Every structure is written in structure tokens, then in C-alpha cells.
Amino acid sequence: MLVLSIALAACVLPAAAHALTQSQITLDQESGGQPTRFTFEAFSDANAEVSSLSLTFPPGFDLKQSTVDAVTQNQALVRIPVKYTVSRVGQAITLTFSPPLTPSIDLQVKVNNVLTPARGGTYPFGVSYVANGITQVQTGMSFSFATPSGGEQVAHWFDQQPWVAKWNSVPFLNLFLQPQYAALAFTTVWVGWLISLALVALAFPLAIMGGLALAFMKMAKIAPVRWIASVYINVIRGTPLFLQIAIAFVGLPIAGFRFPWFPTGVIVLALNSSAYLAEIFRAGIQSINKGQFEAASSLGMTYPKAMQYVIIPQTVKRVLPTMTSEFILLFKDTALLSAVGVFELMLYSNNIVARSGNITPFMVAAVFYLIITIPLINYVGTLERKLAISEGGQVAETKKAARNRRAAADIVVDAVMPSATDQKQG
């Protein structure tokens, strides 16, 4: 009798031990502190009839608002209807199947709206089931997620605020200005903003040196030197920057030349901007009166000395507003590098938009651009007014200046013209 019992156990237990195979647990969120969907998937053995399944979450996971969905399908990916009831005791969710699951099917159980703790890490996941009347426990099941960043925590906090729900109920605000995605974008996009600033901060000084060299080459008396500068300037200015970026990041690797992306981006931006700065410098130099050269020559200065101490300082003063405008254009043109995978400002925001389906990160990116461009635009306007005054020109009078001028005129009139009372007394 003892031998018969051992033989029966040997026949039954192996099948029960492997009733559910290929088990896995996946999450739809990468970080904690937010409602998350847990998906448990397993394949039932050909000899197993599963009558119930229990999923146990670790302490600290809030299951109060959770819902459960179960789906089964056969090996031909055809769905098989399944009837079940759900009960929850503590951290365990139990599904009771009636009738039991048929063998050789794929089981997928989704537990929705599980509020995970904010602290990330690897957590154990308890799985037990009843197959062929025998309770089995699967060991080694676990899942993991990351601790949310500061921006993600703020976004989760916004998700729980009633006024945010009312704000997002407006279609325009919901699409373009969601507080949740704005908080997430501000803490992510700024990294790309720093990269954009680094690109232009290195490229523009190189472009200034290249532009000066090209300007002198185009004004040289040696014809081949002028031709080389003219061809370069015309080709660079006559083709779009995006084409030049594609040649550097796509064409050169195809030809077997591979370089790091950051210096490649700096060089492409510098080469492009140098062509435009060359024309700016050339026009500025040629705008200086020839008498300045003659005066420098009469003092015994050579041509290079005259350029260094007389012509270039006056040229810089005249072209500084235009140079600043070119810097603004170059900073905005860094967005084109996102098309070739350079993680600058636009690519960071575009990635968030692609994941969320919301345009708010683009609005945040616009704010980061405006932080640089608006002060520079105002600075350019101030420089142009000062330059016009120094050159003896006229500038548009501001409202404040107009008010001050009228007030001063009224004071002068009151001081010079006698009042009506004084006239009668006279």
C-alpha cells in the first residue's frame, strides 16, 4: 500500500508542479508612485486544469481602486471565453475559474490601477494556483521599477489635484498646457537645453574666426584666393543647413568616416555660420571710410596694423547687432540636429511628446528658447539705437522718452510765458 501511494504521488506531483509555465509579470509604468497596470501571463500545461489563481502584492501597494481582467487564448491565438470571480483578502487577489481553465492555453491576468510606492527597487511577487486539485506555489517571481524623478513626483502630485482635472477639461489647455507634462518636461528638457547652449557656445567663436578669415580672403587681391572664398560662401549659404547636417552625420559614416556626434555638430554649425559672418564682416569693413586707412598709413601703420587697431574695432562696433542676430539664428538652428539623433533641446521634448501624445513639452521647449532669444533680441535693439545715435542718425522715440520730452517742454513754456493772471495784472 505504501509503495502504491508513492507511485501515485510520483505520477501526479510532477504534472502539478509544472501546471503553469513561462510565467512572467510586466508593468506598464517604469517608475513608482503612480497607478500601474500589472500583467501576469503564463501557459498552462497540457495535463493541467487550473481552477484558481492567487496573486499577492508586497506590503505598501494600494489595491483599493484596482480592477482585474482575465483573458485566455489557445495556441492558434483564438480567444476562449473564461468565467471567473474575483476576491481580495489583504494584499492577495484570487481568481476562481468556473469551469476550470482548459489545458494548453495562454492565460493573461491584468490588475489595473495598483498604486505603487514611490521608492523604486525589486519586489517579490507571490503566485499560487490550484491545478488538478493540488495547490502549487511559484517561487522566484519578482518585478522592479525605478524611483520617480523630482519632475515625475510633481507630475503625480498634479494628477491628484481637483483643479488640475478642471484645467485639463478645457480641450485647448488639455492639449497644449497640461501641468503634469509641463512639470515632467521642465525637469527633463533642460538637459537638452544645456547641450544646445554648449553646441552654440563652442560653434560661434569658431564661426567668428572662420568668418573673419573668409572675409579677408574674399577681399584679397589674389584672384584664386577670392574665388575659393566666394565658392565656399555661396555653396554654404545656397544650401540648407539640414542638408549639411545630413552630409556630416549620414553621408560621412557611409563613406567610412565616423566621428563623435558632439564635435561633429559643433563643426557643422561653425562652418555654416562662418559663411554668413564672412559677408557680415566684409560689409562692415568696406563700410569704413577710406580716409581711415589713409590716416593710419600717414601714421606709419602697415596694412595689418591698420586693420588691427583702426578698422576692425570700428567694424565690430557696426556689425555687433548683426552678429548677435546671427547668434540667435544659430542657437535656434541647433534644433535641426535632433533629426539625426543628437539629444539637444528639441529631441528631449519630442521624446516626451511621442510617449505622452501631448504637445505641452513643445511649449516648454519654446520657453527655454525664449529665455535666450528674447533678452538677446532686446539687446540687439538697444545696440542698434546706440549705434544710430553715435553715427548721427535718428531712432524711433520710445513712449517714455516722448513723455519726458513733453514734460520738459511744458516746464520751459511755463517758465518763459507769463500766465493769464499776470497778463491781466500787467
Image (cartoon, rainbow, N blue to C red):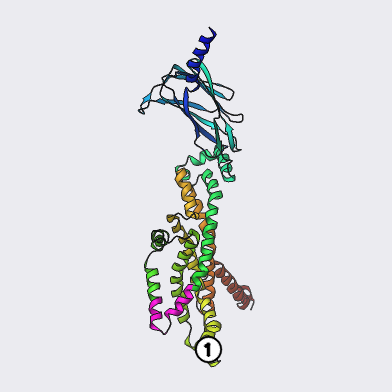
Q: Position of residue 264 (x, y in %)?
A: 47, 62
Magenta stretch: includes residue 217: yes
Q: Type of residue at label 1?
A: Thr
Prevailing secondary structure of the magenta residues: helix
In the rendered structure, which segment of residues is drawn in magenta?
A: 210-229
Residue 176 visible in the shown view: no
Location of mark 1 (residue): 302
Q: Is residue 309 above or below residue 245?
A: below
Quarter-of-image position of residue 63: top right
Which of the pair 258/153 is nearer the observer? 258
Which of the pair 42/113 is nearer the observer? 42
Which of the pair 369/63 is nearer the observer? 63
Q: Is residue 120 above or below residue 190?
A: above
Q: Residue at x 46, y 72 (%)?
A: 277
Q: Residue furthest top?
A: 1
Q: Residue at x 54, y 85 (%)?
A: 305
- The kind of secondary structure element at disc 1 is loop
Q: Position of residue 133 (x, y in %)?
A: 49, 14
Quadrant of the image containing the C terminus = bottom right
Which of the pair 416/112 is nearer the observer? 112
Q: Residue at x 48, y 39 (%)?
A: 169
Magenta stretch: includes residue 195: no
Is residue 271 left or right of 115 when viewed as pictured?
Answer: left
Q: Residues within 10 Å of mark 1 (few under 14, many from 20)?
A: few
Q: Residue at x 52, y 31 (%)?
A: 113
Q: Position of residue 1 (x, y in %)?
A: 53, 6
Q: Position of residue 356 (x, y in %)?
A: 47, 43
Residue 110 visible in the shown view: yes
